[in-house]
Image (cartoon, rainbow, N blue to C red):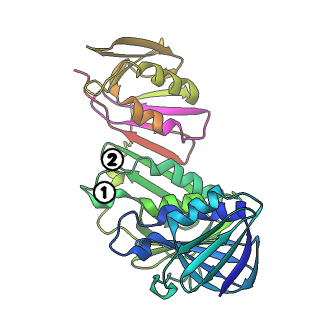
Amino acid sequence: MVKLVCNRGALDEAVGVVRPVVAARTPKPVLQCLKLSAGKNSLTLMATDLEVTIRFEVTQVEVDGAGDAVVPADKFSEIVRVSRGETLSVTAEDNAVVVQSESARFKVLGFDPGEFPGAPEFDGEPDFTIKAGTLGELITRTLFATAKEHTRYAINGVLWEKEGKKLQLIATDGRRLAKAAGDLVKGGKEKVSAIVPVKALTAIQRLLRDSDEVVAVKFTQTQILFHTDRASVAAGLVEGQFPKYQDVIPRESNRKAQIATEDLYVTLQQASILTNEESKGVRLSFSGEGLTMSSSSPDAGEASVKCKVDFEGEALEIGFNPQYLMEALKVVGQPTVELDLQDANKPGLLKAGADFQYVVMPVNLG
C-alpha cells in the first residue's frame, strides 16, 4: 500500500515536467496515466508514450508505505493544481489513488501498476557529460528550426554530432538551418551522430533548471538516454538520413553586415507589420549609408524602416521572411550579429559569436 505526504508545490512541479509526455491519443488507456513509485525517501513520477519516457524524482516527501500506483494524468494533475495547503496526502490501494488536502478528498480510479510499461535503464558509463546550461542553450538555439510537417521524418528531429569535447546540434526545415556548438564537461573517445526527436528535446529542456548541473548522455543504436540527479529521459532516435547540412552553409561572401541584435529585431518587427500571407517578405536594402527595410501589400499598405549597420561590400537588395530572422534573433544570446551575403538569390548566413550559425533562404519579392 502506497502511503505518503508530499509538498504540494514540489509535486505540482514534477507533474508539470512529466505530464507533457503522456500520450494524447492511444488505444491503451494506461498510457494516459502517470506512474507513482514511492521509495524509502522519495517519490518518482513517470510518464511514457512508448516513444519518450521520462522520470522525475520528488524528495520533499515523507513515505510511510512504499510501492507503485498508476493514476490518470489529467485528473491527478488537476487535483494537485487546484488543491490548497502546503502538503498533500497520497495513498493507493487496489488500483485506486486517494489524494487528500486540508479541506478536500479525492478518490481516483487507476490501473494495475503491472500494466504500465517499464523504462530503459541508464547502464554503464555515459558517452559524454555536459552542463545543463550549455545543453539548454544548444537546444534553444536549434529546436525552433525543425520541420513542423512530417513529409521528411528525418528533419522532424535535431542532429547531434559529438567529437572530442565538442557537441553541435543542427536543425533544418528545408528553408532555414540552425547550427549551434558547445563544450562538454567530459567528451569520451567515441564520435556520435544521431537524430533526436523534437518531443524528447522539449522533455529534456523542461528538466534543465540548474545551469551548473552536470547531465550525462548515452546513445544506443536506437535510443538516447539522458540522466541527472533527479530525472531521466529515454527516447527512440529518428530513423533516416539527415540532409548534408555542410553543403548548405555558405563558405564565402562578398558582403558583410554587423548589426546590433536588438536593433535588427525591432526593425524587422516594424517592417513586418504590413505584410500578409501573400507577401510575407521584407526587402532589406544594404548600402554604405545603412540598412533600410521595406514591405508592402495591396490590402494593408506599405512600411519603410531604417536600421544602423556597419556594411562592407556593394549595395544589395534582398528579401527575407522576417519571422525566420526574428526567431533566430530571439535565441542568439549575443549583443551583435553578423549577416554574410552574396547575391539576392543566394542564402544569407547569420552568425553570433563562434558557436552559432543560421542559414536562411531568400524570398522572391517580385
Nearer to us of marks 2 and 1 is: 1
Q: Residue at x 52, y 20 (%)?
A: 309
In the image, farthest residue toward the left? 366
Is 255 located above or below residue 4 in the figure? Answer: above
* Image-quadrant location for residue 205: bottom right
**Closest to the observer, 144 or 68:** 68
Q: What amino acid is at disc 1? A: Pro
**Residue 187 appears in the rendering:** no
> Alpha-carbon neighbours of circle 1 within 10 Å: few (<14), some, or many (≥20)?
some
Mark 1 highlights which residue? 243
Q: Which residues are magenta?
A: 328-349
Is 144 located above or below residue 117 in the figure? Answer: above
Residue 132 relative to residue 253: left or right: right
x, y percent for residue 215? 63, 68
Q: Residue at x 36, y 76 (%)?
A: 28
**Closest to the observer, 295 or 342:** 295
Q: Residue at x 54, y 48 (%)?
A: 355
Q: Is residue 329 inside the magenta stretch? A: yes
x, y percent for residue 2? 66, 84
Q: CA distance from mark 2 to mark 1?
A: 9 Å
**Closest to the observer, 61 or 156:** 61
Q: What amino acid is at disc 2? A: Val
Q: Which mark is residue 248?
A: 2
* Image-quadrant location for residue 65: bottom right
Where, quadrant-wise, is the N terminus in this rendering?
Answer: bottom right
x, y percent for residue 131? 65, 62
**Residue 36 appears in the rendering:** yes
**Label 2 or label 1, whichever comes before in sequence order:** 1
| Discs 2, 1 touching: Cβ within 8 Å | yes
**Closest to the observer, 332 or 117:** 117
